[in-house]
């Protein structure tokens, strides 16, 4: 896929997430690898329903800006994307969104882990077992995003998450995949799990949270 086409696909994804209420205002960020050592990421402070190809900045895996149309700055959360690309070679696309359910589920975490519901949907996240016990990593939120990225780097050095995603408490969920479609599917399935947990909690159905 050409670089311009890749940015257009990311802009379309952002519009879809905006319409779902996951990227309201200028919240959230998206990225895609255009080479082994470089990726496009959304520029800081841009409304996600109005993105075009000029709203993406090219950076390398060290966070250095390679190309910035109109002098735009890369997302403040670029360092989180760097960590994922550095630790997970198969990750080619990353979506970070701010949904209500994801932020509510951060409160259900215990010791930095959120137990996902043992649903058939987890097969779409690469978990083939019936009624598995799978924990999603939940990281503390910090005003300094570099601290979040450092925490993720430390955790991912010890073990890669069992599913392609991670949660930041009272902040949002990040999902990744080998291409645009798989990253979107992974994000949708995690969001389904979050909605399930919130509703199960409200109905006092037996979930660990």
Image (cartoon, rainbow, N blue to C red):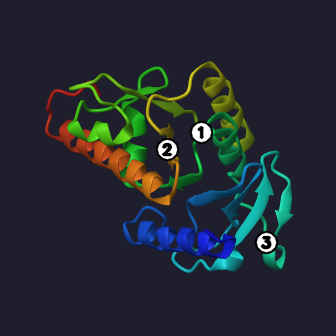
| Disc ID at residue 170 | 2
Badge 3: how crowded within 10 Å, few (<14), some, or many (20+)? some
In-image side of 42 versus 161 (left or right):
right
Q: Real-space Cα distance between discs 2 and 3?
A: 27 Å
Place of residue 15 in the rendered image (x, y in percent of width and height, measured from the top left): 47, 73
Of residues 12 and 111, which is closer to you in this image?
Answer: 12
Q: Residue at x 59, y 59 (%)?
A: 29
Q: Is residue 125 among the parts visible in the rendering? A: yes
Count every numbered label the image shows and give the total.
Answer: 3
Of residues 67 and 201, which is closer to you in this image?
Answer: 67
Q: Real-space Cα distance between discs 1 and 2?
A: 7 Å
Badge 1: how crowded within 10 Å, few (<14), some, or many (20+)? some
Q: Which residue is mark 3?
A: 72
Residue 20 image-quadrant placement: bottom left
Q: Residue at x 57, y 54 (%)?
A: 93
Q: Pointers 1 and 2 in contact (CB under 8 A)?
A: yes
Q: Residue at x 66, y 23 (%)?
A: 157
Of circles 2 and 3, the one toward us is: 3
In-image side of 128 versus 94 (left or right):
left
Of circles 3 and 1, the one toward us is: 3
Q: Which residue is mark 1?
A: 141
Badge 2: how crowded within 10 Å, few (<14), some, or many (20+)? some
Q: Residue at x 29, y 28 (%)?
A: 209
Disc 2 is placed on an element classified as loop
Q: Is residue 143 among the parts visible in the rendering? A: no
Q: On screen, 83 above or below 180?
A: above
């Amino acid at each position: 896929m050409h670089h311009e086409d890749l940015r257009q696909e990311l802009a379309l994804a952002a519009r879809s997430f905006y319409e779902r209420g996951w990227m309201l205002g200028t919240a959230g960020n998206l990225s895609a690898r255009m080479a082994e050592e470089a990726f496009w990421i959304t520029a800081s402070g841009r409304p996600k329903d109005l993105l075009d190809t000029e709203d993406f900045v090219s950076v390398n895996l060290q966070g250095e800006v390679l190309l910035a149309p109109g002098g735009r700055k890369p997302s403040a959360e670029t360092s989180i994307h760097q960590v994922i690309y550095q630790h997970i070679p198969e990750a080619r696309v990353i979506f970070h969104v701010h949904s209500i359910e994801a932020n509510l589920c951060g409160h259900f975490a215990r010791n930095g882990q959120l137990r996902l519901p043992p649903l058939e949907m987890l097969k779409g996240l690469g978990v083939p077992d019936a009624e598995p016990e799978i924990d999603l990593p939940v990281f503390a939120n910090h005003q300094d995003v570099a601290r979040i990225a450092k925490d993720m780097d430390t955790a991912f050095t010890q073990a890669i998450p069992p599913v392609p995603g991670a949660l930041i408490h009272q902040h949002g969920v990040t999902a990744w995949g080998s291409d645009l479609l798989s990253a979107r599917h992974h994000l949708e399935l995690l969001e389904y799990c979050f909605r399930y947990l919130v509703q199960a909690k409200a109905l006092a159905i037996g979930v660990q949270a």
